[in-house]
């Protein structure tokens, strides 16, 4: 008789709850959803707001759907950083969770283009759809089948922290840098493509 595998889906977002609802209807044989990490053998993180502790990882298989292309975009606020860095595409990465921040071996990537009109929010919305699609594709495989992983290239790794994003929000020095009487001030383009000046 096969041992029952106990799965916990850790999430802090609606897409994670959608994944749970889908998983409940598509559970492989000898697999069961549980209500806590402590009960589980396998943890699948879907936009979970917390990092799993070493104790939570120990003795379990743990996987994460990360909103960012690894190893280039580890950490938080990757949608915002991709736009700041003028990337042409954005990636969702399924990876093994280890004790680092998004440093585990990569299982799969899925990329989609960043359009000219995209914002961090619109990328987040697109990313949720991709995560849901990837979850459905990989759920049974993660639980029941062998699969290949690729170690991350640490030489290409970039870690973005929440405090870095908070610092990037402060545009004071840019506005000051372009303040000069009778010279063009700093500006941005709104949704209608109109140039809006920001005066100091």
Image (cartoon, helix red, strand yellow):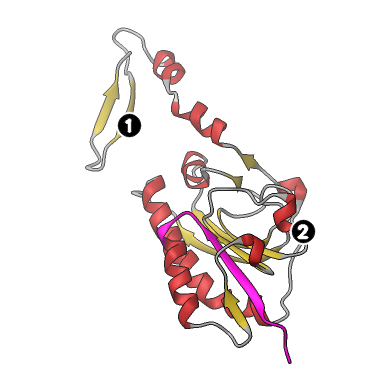
Is 9 within the magenta? yes
Which residue carries the number 2 mark? Answer: 58
Q: Nearer the viewer, residue 107 or 194?
A: 107
Indicate the quadrant containing the N terminus: top left, top right, bottom left or bottom right.
Answer: bottom right
What residue do we see at 54% from left, 77% from top? 137
Residue 199: x and y, percent?
30, 16
Residue 27: x and y, percent?
54, 82
Q: Which mark is residue 73?
A: none
Compared with residue 10, is residue 145 higher up or lower down, i.e. above or below?
Answer: below
Q: Nearer the viewer, residue 79 or 14?
A: 14
Side (left or right) of 122 relative to 41: left
Compared with residue 2, is residue 167 higher up or lower down, i.e. above or below?
Answer: above
Report the number of numbered marks.
Answer: 2
Q: Which residues are magenta?
A: 1-14
Is 178 within the magenta? no
Indicate the quadrant containing the C terminus: top left, top right, bottom left or bottom right.
Answer: top left
Residue sitting farthest toward the bottom: 1
Which residue carries the number 1 mark? Answer: 188
Residue 187: x and y, percent?
33, 26
CB within 8 Å, label 1 to label 2: no
**What is the secondary structure assignment of the residue under circle 1?**
strand
Q: Nearer the viewer, residue 62 or 188?
A: 62
**What is the secondary structure assignment of the residue under circle 2?**
loop
Ranked by sequence position, the earlier of labels 1 and 2 is 2
Residue 86: x and y, percent?
49, 43
Residue sitting farthest toward the top: 181
The 10 Å Cα crowd at callout 1, few under 14, some 14 to 19, many 20 or more, is few
What residue do we see at 64% from left, 49% from top? 72
What residue do we see at 44% from left, 64% from top? 17
């Amino acid at each position: 008789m096969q041992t029952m595998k106990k799965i916990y889906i850790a999430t802090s977002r609606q897409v994670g709850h959608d994944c749970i609802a889908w998983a409940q209807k598509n559970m492989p044989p000898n697999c069961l959803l549980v209500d806590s990490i402590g009960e589980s053998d396998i943890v699948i993180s879907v936009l979970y707001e917390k990092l799993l502790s070493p104790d939570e990882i120990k003795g379990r298989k743990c996987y994460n759907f990360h909103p960012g292309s690894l190893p280039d975009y580890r950490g938080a606020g990757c949608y915002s950083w991709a736009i700041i860095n003028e990337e042409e595409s954005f990636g969702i990465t399924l990876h093994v969770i280890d004790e680092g921040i998004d440093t585990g071996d990569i299982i799969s990537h899925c990329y989609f283009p960043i359009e000219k009109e995209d914002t961090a929010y619109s990328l987040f919305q697109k990313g949720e759809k991709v995560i849901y699609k990837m979850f459905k594709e990989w759920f049974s495989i993660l639980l029941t089948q062998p699969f290949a992983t690729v170690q991350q290239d640490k030489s290409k790794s970039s870690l973005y922290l929440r405090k870095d994003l908070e610092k990037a929000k402060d545009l004071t020095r840019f506005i000051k840098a372009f303040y000069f009487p009778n010279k063009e001030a700093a500006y941005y383009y709104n949704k209608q493509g109109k140039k809006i000046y920001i005066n100091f």
